[in-house]
Amino acid sequence: MRLSVDPRDGGVRLVLPKRGSMREALRWAEAKRDWIENALDALPPTRSLTDGMAIDVAGETLTVTLVSGRGVKRDGDRLLVAGPEDMLASRLVRWLKREALTRLQAETDRFAALADITVTKVAVGDPRSRWGSCSARGDIRYSWRLILAPYAVLEATVAHEVAHRLHMDHSPAFHAAVIRLLGRDPAPERAWLRANGASLHWLGRDP
């Protein structure tokens, strides 16, 4: 049996052997209650989207500021979010998704030109299990939360997905293509995501 806590959503997962007893497994998990509670306590803190908070956007730290009027726009190092306070979070997330798509589309176009390949469509979503995916027909889908990471991490993720248009695997040739497109080894960016990626999923989540 195996017990784990997913750092991306706090879900507790219990894996049984093929012919394992559910009753025995639940009894075993109950005995691990202290371990589960400690693992949950170690999860990244929830970060609600609020007026005055600092938020990293494409490697720049901006201060969210609630204002009157309409829309969301940048003003220097401030991110001005207009409207009633109870709409701040939803409006800010919509803006972040649009900003993510704009940046990811631009980087995808840049790397696709370098690779001399075609990407048929770029889209963003909010998956928990991956930062990007590339289909055989050339569609690439990214997590919008990459906009919250350092820009080098966003770049490396795009290079990774564009390289899949050359090699739909993780062969040595694929990794060589990533390095060639990016102009460097993406190991530091991969390490950053392993260490910090889970925390990006907790931004905007209700406590």
Image (cartoon, grey):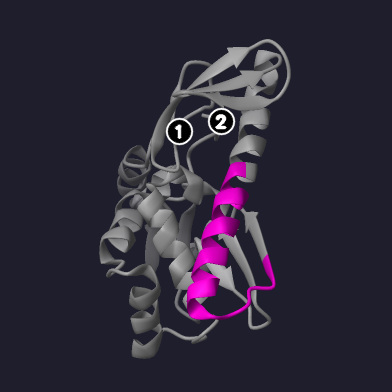
Q: Nearer the viewer, residue 153 or 42?
A: 153
- Residue under label 2, please give it: 206
Cβ atoms under marks 2 and 1 closer than 8 Å: yes
User: Which of the 4 quarters of the picture holds residue 121?
Assistant: bottom right
Q: Look at the image and say whether residue 109 sits in the magenta stretch.
A: yes
- Which residue lies at the image location 60% right of the left edge and 58% below the top edge? 105
Residue 55 lies, in percent from the top left, at 44, 30
The type of residue carrying mark 1 is Thr
Residue under numbered circle 1: 46
Stretch of the chain drawn in magenta: 99-121
- Left or right: residue 129 versus residue 137 is left
Residue drawn at 40 percent across, 44 percent down: 199
What residue is shown at x 41% (from left), y 46% (from top)?
A: 149
> Residue 154 at what x, y percent from top left?
44, 55
Q: In which quarter of the image is the N terminus?
A: bottom left
**Label 2: element kind:** loop
